[in-house]
Image (cartoon, rainbow, N blue to C red):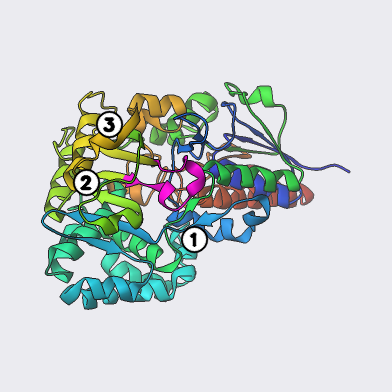
Amino acid sequence: MFRNRAVVVGAGPNGLAAAIVLARAGMDVTVFEAESEAGGATRSAPVFGPGTIVDLGSAAHPLGVSSPFLRSLDLERHGLRWIHPDIPAAHPLEDRPAALLHASLDRTAAELGRDGRSWRWLLGSSVRHWDRLTETLLGPLVRIPRDPLVLGDFGVCAVAPATALARLAFSDEPARALFAGCAAHSFVPLHHPLTSAFGLLLAAAAHSRGWPVAQGGSRAIARALVAELEAHGGRVVTDHPVADLAELGPADLTLLDIGPRAALDLLGDRLPSRVARAFRAWRYGPSAHKVDYLLDGPVPWTDERVGGAGTVHLGGTMAEIAEAESLVAQGRHPERPYVLLCQQSVADATRVPPGQQVVYAYAHTPRASADPATGQRIDAQIERFAPGFRDRILARVETPPAALERFDRNLVDGDIIGGSIIGTQQVLRPRATLQPYSLGVPGVFLCSASTPPGGGVHGMSGYHAARAALASLHRGSRDRSAGGRVGE
C-alpha cells in the first residue's frame, strides 16, 4: 500500500521527535544524521576512560521530564530512567549557607526565611498548574493560549526583568541569588524584560517534576527516542551529512533539525526572499565554554549540603551574576563568570568508578570566544565555593565554543540555545510569522531549537513542527481532491 514519505535532516531530540510524530501518523520516515550517532547535543561518551560517562552536551533535564510530548511516549519501556538527585539545584554563597532549590516548594520557602512567603506566592500557581502551564509555554507563543487563565497568572510576573522582580519580591540575598541563578539560564542580561520567565519556569519545574539526569548519560534519551521511532517503522541513517535535499529522493514532507543559517545554505534560492532575509538577519547568542573534570572524590563544597545537588549555580550574589551576564552581552569577559555545574554522578552511580566523581561545568562567554583564560576562570569560580577543588582533579577536558560547534553543527559558535533570545527573537522565532515552522517552501519545515519553544531537551519544537507539516499535507490532499492548487 502507498505510504507518504517523510525525511528528517538531523537526529537531535527535535528531529527525532518530529520523526516519531510523522511515523505514528503512518508515514514512511527516514532521519539522516551527519554524525556517527543520533542525539545531537544529547550524547555521552567515556571521556575519561572505561567506566566513566560524560555528557557531551545537555546534562540536567527539567524540561525533558516535564515535556508533554516526551511524557506521552512512555520512553521508560525503551530503557530511559530519570534519576533525581536529593536536591535539584543549589546556589552557594560566600560567608553564609547556600540557597537550596528543593523539590518541595514548602521546604524551599521555609529555608528562605522571611522571603519564603514571597517565594511561595511567586511560584505557587505555576506549581499547582504545572502540566497545564507547560502545555502552553512549550509551544508557539504567538497564538491563542489553550489555558489563558493559567498563563495569565504566570505572565504577570514573567514579563519583568529578573533583577527588578527579585528586588521587589525578596529582601534577602539567598532568595535573590537563587532566583537570579535560574533566570541566568537564558543567556540574557538580567535587567532585560522577560528574564523573570526563565527564573519562574525553572524554579517551578524543580518543585513540580524535578531536575533529573538520565541514567547512563543523556545519550539514553536519544537512544530511547530512536527505539520509539523504530517501533513505528522509522529509521535513522547516521554518517550521512546532507548538502542537497535532492540526494534524499522525493518526499512528501521534509523537516530540518538545523538552524536558520544552515537552512539558508541548504535551500538557497528555493527560500522565498522574505524568509531568506529573516534568516540572514538571524542572531546567535553568547557562547558556552565547557570543562569536564574527573575527581578523586566529592567536590569539597564549603556548605556540604551542596554535595547533594544535581545542578549548582556558581555566580555569587544576584548583583555579581547580573554584572557578569551584562559583560558577556557586551563582548567582554567577566573575571567571575556565571558557571553552571552538574554533578550527575551524585545521583547516577553508573557514570563513574567507585570513589571518584565526574563534574560537568560551563561558563557563559562572549560569542565565539577563544580566550584561553576562560577555563581557568571556571576552575577559580568552583574553587571559590569549594576550597581544595583543584587538588581533587585527576583529569580535565576543556571544550571551548569552537569545539562545541565541531561536536554539533547546530551549536553555532558555541551557542547552545539555538540563537539569541534578546529582543524579538525570544517571541518571534525564527522570524515574524504566525507559521514559525514553515519555510515557505511546499512540504519543507524547520523543527530545530531556533523554532518555538526554543532550547532545551524537550522535543516540543519537533512535535509542533511535525503537527504543522501534517496539517499542510492534509490541506494539500483536500485541495487536490477538490481540484485546487497545492502550496502556500
Q: Is residue 194 above or below residue 293?
A: below
Q: Which residues are magenta?
A: 341-356
**Image position of 173 with respect to 338: above or below:** below
Residue 188 % position (x, y): 25, 47
115 to the left or right of 60: left
Residue at image mark 2: 386
Q: Residue at x 20, y 38 (%)?
A: 328
Mark 3, mark 1: which one is toward the viewer? Answer: 1
Q: Quadrant of the C terminus?
A: top right
What type is the residue that disc 3 sits on?
Arg
Image location of residue 66, percent across then percent down: 49, 60
Q: Determine the image quadrant of residue 398.
A: top left
The vertical placement of 316 against 442, above or below, is below
User: Alpha-carbon distance for marks 3 and 1?
Assistant: 30 Å
Query: Which residue is disc 1 drawn over?
Result: 66
Residue placed most toward the observer, 4 or 202: 202
Q: Nearer the viewer, residue 178 or 385?
A: 385
Mark 2 touches mark 3? (CB < 8 Å): no
Mark 3 falls on what kind of element? loop
**Secondary structure under the numbered disc 1 in the rendered image:** helix
Give residue 287's position: percent from left, percent from top: 30, 34
Question: Whole-Å distance between the Cαs marked 2 and 3?
Answer: 28 Å
Neighbours of disc 1 within 10 Å: few (<14), some (14-19), many (20+): many
Which of the pair 52/356 is nearer the observer? 356
Residue 198 can be seen in this image:
no
Q: Is residue 31 left or right of residue 312?
A: right
Instruction: Classify residue 317 by image quadrant.
Output: bottom left
Q: Which residue is mark 3?
A: 367
